[in-house]
Image: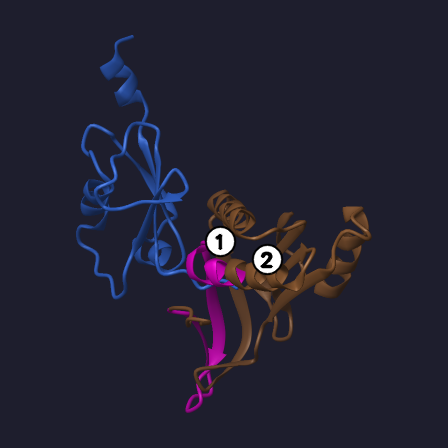
C-alpha cells in the first residue's frame, strides 16, 4: 500500500494495524522497516519547521513503480510506504517503508532499495524554516539535494 | 473536424514545482503544441529570460523524460529541481 498523508502519523501504529489487516499470519518470517524523522538541525543551522511539497499523481505513480521493481528482484509478501506532505515540525515522522518476506534477506534488501530510490527519484521537495547559526531572523530555504545513502 | 484542428484545440500542460514554481512565479502554463516537438523545445520556450542555479529535471505525463523526448497535444510536461523527499 502507498499512502501520501497531509497530517501527522504514527509509523509504529501504522505498521501494527497494517500487519494485522494483511491476513498473512504464519506466512512471514521477516519485516524490515525504515522510519525517517524530521531533525531540528541541518548544515549547522537550527530548523524550526518544514514544508513538504510533492507532485500529486507522479508521486504515487513513481512509488508504485519502485514497489514493482522491488517485487521483481526480491520475494516479498507485502510492502507499505507512507510519506508525509504539508507542514511538519521537528520530530515528526516523514516517511515509513516496511517490507514483509519469508526470510530476512528479501525484506532487508528490498526495504533499503525502496528507500534509496524514493530519496533519489520520488518527486518530493523540502523547504526548511531555519535560523542560521550567525543570524537571529528566520528564513525559508529549499533543501538543495539529498545525500546518497550508500 | 480535421486532425490539425484537434491538435490546436489541445494545448500542452506545463507544470513547475518547488523552487522552479517560485522562479516562474506560477505553478504552470499552457503551450500550443504547434510550437514544440520535444521536452527541450518546451524548456527553451518557457525558460527564456530566467536564470537557474541548479539542474532541472523533467517529466512527460508523470514519468521522467529526456530533453529529446517527443511531446504532443494534450501531454503534461513538468519541470522541477532535484528531489529531496524521504
Magenta stretch: give its range: A115-144
Neighbourhood count class around disc 2 (C-alpha, 10 Å): few under 14, some 14–19, many 20 upward: many
Disc 2 element: strand
Which of the numbered marks, if any, corresponds to residue A83? 2
Q: How many marks?
A: 2
Closest to the camera, between mark 1 and mark 2, is 2
Spot the residue most to the top.
Answer: B1
Looking at the image, what colour scheme do you see? Answer: by chain
Neighbourhood count class around disc 1 (C-alpha, 10 Å): few under 14, some 14–19, many 20 upward: many
Residue under label 1 = A54
> Observer-nearest residue: A27 or B5?
A27
| Chain of the residue where label 2 is placed in the rendered structure | A
Task: State which chain is coloured brown.
Answer: A
Disc 1 element: strand
Q: Is residue A60 magenta?
A: no
Q: Is residue A129 magenta?
A: yes
Is B41 displayed left or right of A124 in the figure? left
Same chain assignment for discs 1 and 2: yes
Image vertical order of residue A30 relative to residue A134, above or below: above
Image position, residue A68 (x, y; %) = 53, 45
Image position, residue A121 (x, y; %) = 42, 56
Q: Is residue B24 visible?
A: yes
Q: Which image quarter holds the C terminus of chain A?
A: bottom left
Spot the residue most to the bottom.
Answer: A134
Image vertical order of residue B59 relative to residue B10, above or below: below
> Observer-nearest residue: A27 or A45?
A27
Which of the numbered marks, if any, corresponds to residue A2? none
Q: In the figure, what tint was chain B given?
A: blue
Q: Earlier in the sequence, mark 1 or mark 2?
A: 1
Residue occupying image coordinates x 39% and y 48%: B27
Amino acid at each position: 500500500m502507498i499512502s501520501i498523508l497531509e497530517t501527522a502519523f504514527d509509523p509504529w501504529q501504522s505498521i501494527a494495524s497494517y500487519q494485522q489487516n494483511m491476513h498473512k499470519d504464519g506466512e512471514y518470517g521477516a519485516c524490515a522497516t525504515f522510519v525517517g524523522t524530521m531533525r531540528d538541525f541541518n548544515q549547522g543551522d537550527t530548523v524550526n519547521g518544514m514544508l513538504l511539497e510533492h507532485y500529486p499523481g507522479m508521486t504515487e505513480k513513481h512509488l508504485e513503480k519502485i514497489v514493482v521493481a522491488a517485487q521483481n528482484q526480491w520475494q516479498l509478501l507485502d510492502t507499505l510506504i507512507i510519506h508525509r506532505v504539508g507542514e511538519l515540525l521537528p520530530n515528526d515522522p516523514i516517511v515509513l517503508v516496511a517490507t514483509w518476506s519469508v526470510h530476512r534477506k528479501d525484506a532487508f534488501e528490498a526495504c533499503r532499495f525502496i528507500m534509496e530510490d524514493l530519496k533519489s527519484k520520488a518527486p518530493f521537495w523540502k523547504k526548511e524554516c531555519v535560523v542560521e547559526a550567525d543570524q537571529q531572523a528566520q528564513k525559508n530555504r529549499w533543501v538543495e539535494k539529498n545525500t546518497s545513502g550508500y | 473536424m480535421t486532425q490539425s484542428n484537434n491538435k490546436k484545440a489541445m494545448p500542452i500542460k506545463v507544470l513547475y514545482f518547488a523552487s522552479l514554481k517560485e522562479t516562474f512565479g506560477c505553478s504552470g502554463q499552457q503551450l500550443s503544441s504547434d510550437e514544440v516537438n520535444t521536452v527541450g523545445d518546451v524548456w527553451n520556450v518557457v525558460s527564456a529570460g530566467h536564470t537557474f542555479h541548479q539542474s532541472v529535471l523533467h517529466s512527460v505525463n508523470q514519468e521522467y523524460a529526456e530533453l529529446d523526448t517527443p511531446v504532443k497535444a494534450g501531454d503534461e510536461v513538468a519541470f522541477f529541481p532535484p528531489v529531496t523527499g524521504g
